[in-house]
Image (cartoon, rainbow, N blue to C red):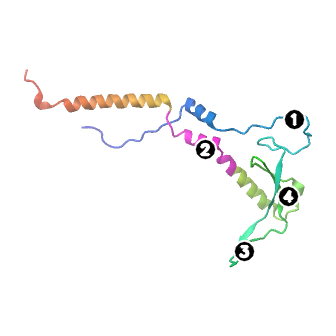
Amino acid sequence: MFYTKPKKVRFRASRELRYACNRSIQREFPVSNVRSIPTNLLRCAKCGSSHFVEGIFTQHMAQYSGSPGGDTRSVTENPVRAQVCLCGHPVMPGQLRLRAVPDHRSFKKSFDAALLYRETTSPEAILRRIAVAYAGKSQHDELAERIANMETILKELSSYSPRKRSKS
C-alpha cells in the first residue's frame, strides 16, 4: 500500500537565482558629483538629485455635493509645503517649516507611512519577500531525481503480479 496523503513541497530560491533576478531589476543610480553644483544645495537621500518639485499637502474631508469636484473639502488651515525628488522620494520638511503647521504630528505620521510604503513596495523588497518561497537549482534537480526514481519503482511494481510467479 502506498502512502497517499498529500504532502507539501517547499521551494527556496538559490543564491544564483536571486543574483540573476537582482541583475534584471533596474536600480537607481546616484547623480555624479559635478563641481559646478554648490555643496549647500538640497540633495535627495535616495538618488542624489538636486531637483525637486514643491508639493502643497493638506488634509481633506469627504462631503456630499452635487457639483463636480465638490465631494472633498480641505480642512487644513496652513498647508505643508514639502519637496519631492524627480525619483519620487519625498523630503521631510525642516523643523521650522513644520512648526508653522498646527498639526505637524499628523503630517509626520503620514510622511512616515508613505516612506514605509515606498520601501516595502520597491522591487528589491518584493524580491526579498518572494525569494524564500522558491527552490534553487540543486533542490530542483534533487526533486526531479527523486520523482524519476519513484516513477521507476511504480513501473516495476505495476508489472509485478503475484499470479505470474513461477512455481519453483
Q: Which mark is residue 98?
A: 4
Residue 126 disc label: 2
Q: Along the horizontal axis of the image, is 139 left or right of 112?
A: left
Image quarter (top left, top right, bottom left or bottom right) of the N terminus: top left
Determine whether the residue tagged by mark 1 lies in a helix, strand or loop. Answer: loop
Picture quadrant where residue 80 is located:
bottom right
Look at 41% across and 31% down and name the residue there. Answer: 143
Marks 2 and 1, the one that precedes in the sequence: 1
x and y percent of residue 85 in the render?
Answer: 79, 48
- Kindly identify which residue carries mark 3: 70
Q: Which residue is mark 1?
A: 34
Magenta region: 117-135
State how far apart marks 3 and 1 are (Cα). 47 Å
Q: Earlier in the sequence, mark 3 or mark 1?
A: 1
Mark 1 surroundings within 10 Å by alpha-carbon count, few (fewer than 14), some (14 through 19), many (20 or more) = few
Residue 105: which quarter of the image? Answer: bottom right
Query: How far apart, in angstroms, are the residues tagged by discs 3 and 2?
Result: 38 Å
